[in-house]
Amino acid sequence: MPLASLYGALVGLSVLGTELIKAFIIPKIRAIGERIEPYLDGTGQAINADRIAASHIKQLTIVSSRLATLMTIVKNSGTLLVRHFMVP
C-alpha cells in the first residue's frame, strides 16, 4: 500500500473515534513505525511525496494515540473532569 493511502486510511479511522483508534491504530503502531522509518531517516531512496506522507503518518499516530489515552482518562475520571473543562 502506498504511504499516501496508508495516511488516508489512518485519517479515516482517527476521525471515526477513539474506540477505533484503540482497536485498529494503537496495536499497529510498531508496524507503522517500521514501515515509515526508512523514509524519515533518509536512508532509502524515497521520493519527496513518500517523505511527506511518512512525516504526516508519524504526526497522526502520535496525536491519535495521545487522544485515545486522554479520552480513556476522561472516561475513567467520571464527570468531575468534564465539569472542570466546561464553559459556564
Image: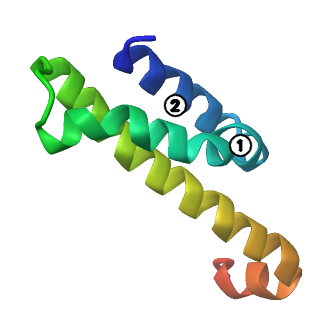
Across and down, in percent, residue 24 comes to 71, 37
Q: Amino acid at mark 1?
A: Gly
Asked if 79 appears above or below 58 in the picture, the reply is below
Image x and y of residue 61, in percent: 48, 47
For the residues labelled 2 and 1, say whether their Cβ atoms are less than 8 Å apart: no
The x, y position of residue 33, in whole percent, is: 42, 43
Residue denoted by label 1? 17
Residue occupying the point 55% across, 63% down: 66
What crowding class fits label 1: few (fewer than 14 Cα within 10 Å), some (14-19), or many (20 or more)? Answer: some
Q: Quadrant of residue 85?
A: bottom right
Q: Earlier in the sequence, mark 2 or mark 1?
A: 2
Residue found farthest to the front = 43
Question: From the viewer's perspective, is 86 left or right of 44?
Answer: right
Q: Residue furthest top?
A: 1
Q: CA distance from mark 2 to mark 1?
A: 10 Å
Q: Mark 2 highlights which residue?
A: 11
Residue 84: quarter of image? bottom right
Left or right: 76 in relation to 25 = right
Name the residue at 43% across, 26% down.
7
Mark seen at residue 41:
none
**Whether residue 20 is situated above or below residue 81 in the rendered picture:** above
Q: Quadrant of the C terminus?
A: bottom right
Badge 1 marks a residue whose secondary structure is: loop
Foreground pick, 16 / 65: 65
Name the residue at 38% across, 12% down: 2
Three-letter code, disc 2: Val
